[in-house]
Image (cartoon, rainbow, N blue to C red):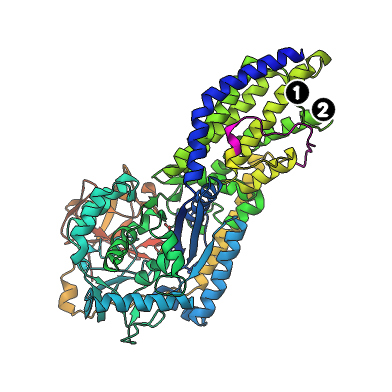
Amino acid sequence: MFLVYKLTFANIKVLNFISVKFESIKRKEGILMNKKPYYITTPIYYPSAKLHIGNTYTTVAADAVARFKRLTGYDVMFLTGSDEHGQKIQRIAEEKGVTPKQYVDEIVAGIKELWKLMNISYDKFIRTTDNYHEESVKKIFKKLYDKGDIYKGEYEGWYCTPCESFFTESQLVDGKCPDCGRPVEKAKEEAYFFKMSKYADRLIEYIETHPDFIQPETRKNEMLNNFLRPGLQDLCVSRTSFNWGIPVEFDTDHVVYVWIDALSNYITALGYLNDEPALMEKYWPADVHLIGKDILRFHTIYWPIMLMALELPLPKQVFGHGWLMLEGGKMSKSKGNIVDPEVLVEHFGVDAVRYYLLHEIPFGSDGIFSNEIFIKKTNSDLANDLGNLLSRTVTMISKYFGGEMPAPNVKEAVDDELIKLALETPSKVEKEIDDLKIPYALDHIWTLIRRTNKYIDETEPWILGKDESKKDRLSTVLYNLSESLRFISVLVSPFLPETSEKINEQLNIDLTSWDSLVSFDGTKAGTKVEKKGVIFPRIDVEKKLAEFEKIAEEQRKAAAAANDEEKQEMIPIKDEITIDDFDKIDLRVVTVLECEPIKKAKKLLKLKVDLGGEIRQVVSGIAQHYKPEDLIGKQVILVANLKPVKLRGELSQGMILAAYTNDDSKLVLAGIQGKLPNGSQVG
Ligand code: MSP
């Protein structure tokens, strides 16, 4: 029997050796050669509200990549932080009756707590209120001014405070912010401007000749076609209407525009123009700025132009990931799903949340969050696939070998497929991470997990365990299961670090390096194996959903109460008009006759309204607030002499009036008290 084992095992080893030799050499060489710096950043977060589960995505994704790079031998610098200046923060602090610094200190402490909870392994947390950052930004501004790239002028246009962005009249959509759709404010003030246009051609050429610079590919075209090619305007880079910002050193009535301040963090954190320039030499240019798609314009236009002006190399890549959305649209507590990461972690553990985020936002596009999908995924992928595999393996080693890891003995052909897949998986995962295709990397690991489960079904260890003469074969099966779990534990460690530790603890694994994955024999026979609880308990979907519905209801009530209580920020009244100006607007009472959604336009409804003697078609952005059937028969107010436009290919002959909160979370159609003939004038 011993001889059979020796021969079989040796043969298979030789085969394995040949099949993986190339892979292993390639990987080992890679590791040795790639002992090089890797710099990854997340955006720095506004401390303006409690972070929801969608916000945490960028940082969890960056953490997974940073951990993976450390595992595969890179010298990693992972930067995150907080973006604390600007009009938005100043206003919130004023409303709360505290100083901006008091306000941000408290919120930033909460953000750091959240990152601790989410197991974020950042190397540095930068605050834009840190002294070294402020000093560097002052020098950056002065340097650009001295160079002639910044000049003084006057700004007149529109400002979106939530986005901290400037817009011209023509860039507004329906008079609102083209990025977030919220109302904008008129701004007219003395300001410094950055000559963006001077660098536009160089940037276009750079983007065209560096295909990896903006990723995913589709986002690159959006930047080129929508912003760069139509021509860049000079950017307003200072403000005088508030003072919560970094002062312009040579003209202290001005504070530096918050995006110039914020984007600089990526180099000030490395000591640029301050005390620690050694980090700059080592880590700049960044390997990747990981950001959400909403802030791509700042990172692929303003930021590279700033760097060009500072004569610094550009980051190797800016990756704009998709968003995590709720089924009904953007994340918000009032929508009833549990979007608070702390609540989710409390109920399911940090790795269930990390897994969902990392696996459910498809590469390059948006993902959906719902409590139900989340719970079902946790059950299927984590409790069933991974949790059961570990639990069955440890239980069988305890039952058949008294909890002592057996040595491999009799090998059979069925083992080869598992071993081959295990040995091939690391390089597949590495390739996906190099391309930032995080969900695909997890797919490869789960293919190995599922293959290992299938191996249990194929080898039937519970039958082998009944027959003493098959004990040697049983040893091999359980050894292979444990070794496969060792591979899985190492592979999964960047994504689910806590789970990896739990697997290591139960199987007593101490060989956890990346290069230990070049051969399938790292598990040590004779080590003690011990079951220490279930790593992912199965969740009763119905029960949990009911429990969550209660929590969600409370959250909804709290959000509504907070909305009622919190006086909403007063948007300044627009410039004065005369009665003649007002008289130009023709408002009429109309009745909604028909109403239907517009395909692929979640926000829009198409209405047919009776203007008395004339039927009009109107497209209105109210779909998230009204169901078509609720509107039919209602009388509303129409701006009847508005120039017709086409929205999503549909003609809109006028605009329905509505009132909405500043953040657009609530919208109510304007109407009349009582009934009037259609076509009646409003004035
Ligand atoms: N302060 C700026 C960034 C300055 S970087 C020099 C900012 N901050 S933020 O707090 O509004 O956003 C932080 C990150 O959260 C961004 O990458 C943003 O895209 C991301 N997300 C916000 N909501 C999100 C989802 N629902 N889903 C995924 N990511 C989301 O922008």
Above or below, comparing residue 150 to residue 367 in the picture:
below
Quick one: 287 or 184, which is closer to the camera? 287
Q: Main secondary structure of the magenta part?
A: loop
For the point 40% across and 70% down, the residue is 272
Specify the amino acid type for callout 1.
Ser
Residue 631 horizontal/vertical position (percent): 35, 52
For the point 65% across and 34% down, the residue is 485
Magenta span has 130?
no
Quick one: 636 or 300, which is closer to the camera? 300
Graded by Cα atoms within 10 Å as few (under 14), some (14 to 19) or many (20 or more), the crowding at tag 2 reads: some
Specify the amino acid type for callout 2.
Phe
Above or below, comparing residue 600 to residue 158 in the picture:
above
Residue indicated by mark 1: 475
Residue indicated by mark 2: 401
Quarter of the rendering occupied by the C terminus: bottom left
Q: Which residues are magenta?
A: 516-533
